[in-house]
Amino acid sequence: MRKWTYLVATLLMAGTTATFTGCIDTDEPEGIAELRGAKSDFIKAQAAVELVEAELRKAQVAEQELVNAGLALQNKSAEIDLQLHELDIQLKQLLIEKEEAATAQAKAEAEAAIAKAEADKTKWENEKALIVEQYKEKMLLAETATAKAQEAYKQAMEQIEASKLLLTDEEQARLNGVQAQVAYAKQAMDKAMYGYSTTVIKRILSSEVANSTTTTNPDESTETNSSTTKYYVYLITEDPT
């Protein structure tokens, strides 16, 4: 988690006192109250971002466990299906042997083999049903974790917007970068879980600053290198379609 070190409010120093006849007015000036409110909202936004990052990590773990469970289900199902297929072939052969049994003993042996094959088939079918249920449990856990992360993301975005009050342009730009970082994480989570995301992030060029540095070579000649620094803002929206 990247630490936020933004200056949110000016240090207020009370260096003078005013004397009034009667009572003293202890109400804060409106501007100071607004600064305190902005700082409070900013702290809430910081806590909200920390929460959404924690929930996103939980969702990521749950989604990976779901993927692992899906692979296990796929592999185990293939193994079980092969066993069931072989048992079906075996049962058909045993039924034929039972019908063609020339003696009571041969018929009894065929019936015993049929009973065992059917018991084995039931065992494999139950095992397959169990791993399907385990997969469903992992899916439910992943869906729950994803929903919690999405709600935390929504609250974090609201807190970030609220914290922009009275911030400088530089502070707002940094805060916008934090919004984008969280939005990209949420977008990746959605795509991992559902294959798509309703979060749309657009990077827009806001300004370009030309930079130049001059260096002096050993022969006292000079070299000037020019470069351009580009600054972007991120527009984050939700597209339910």
Image (spheres, rainbow, N blue to C red):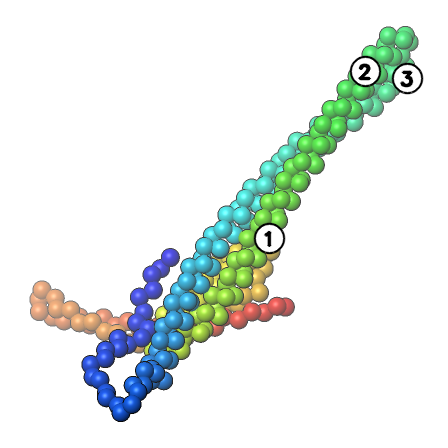
Name the residue carrying label 1.
Answer: 143
Q: Disc 1 and disc 2: Cα gap in Å?
A: 47 Å
Residue occupying the point 75% across, 28% down: 122
Q: Nearer the viewer, residue 143 or 206?
A: 143
Task: From the top left corner, tell me how far across and down residue 94 is, in percent.
Answer: 83, 19
Task: From the top left corner, tell me how far across and down residue 82 is, in percent.
Answer: 70, 30
Residue 29 image-quadrant placement: bottom left
Residue occupying the point 53% across, 68% down: 200
- Mark closer to the observer (1, 3): 1
Residue 228 located left or right of residue 111: left
Name the residue carrying label 2.
Answer: 112
Q: Which mark is residue 99?
A: 3
- Mark closer to the observer (2, 3): 2
- Mark closer to the observer (1, 2): 1
Q: Which mark is residue 31?
A: none
Task: From the top left corner, tell me how far across and down residue 182 is, in percent.
Answer: 45, 62
Number of residues whose C-alpha sits closer than 10 Å to that of mark 3, classed few (under 14), some (14–19) or many (20 or more) = few
The amino acid type of the residue labelled 3 equals: Glu
Q: Disc 1 and disc 3: Cα gap in Å?
A: 53 Å
Name the image quarter holding the N terminus. bottom left
Number of residues whose C-alpha sits closer than 10 Å to that of mark 1, classed few (under 14), some (14–19) or many (20 or more) = some
Tell which circle, 1 or 3, labels the residue nearer the N-terminal end. 3
For label 3, the SS is: helix
Name the image quarter holding the C terminus. bottom right
Residue 157 located left or right of residue 81: left
Tell which circle, 1 or 2, labels the residue nearer the N-terminal end. 2
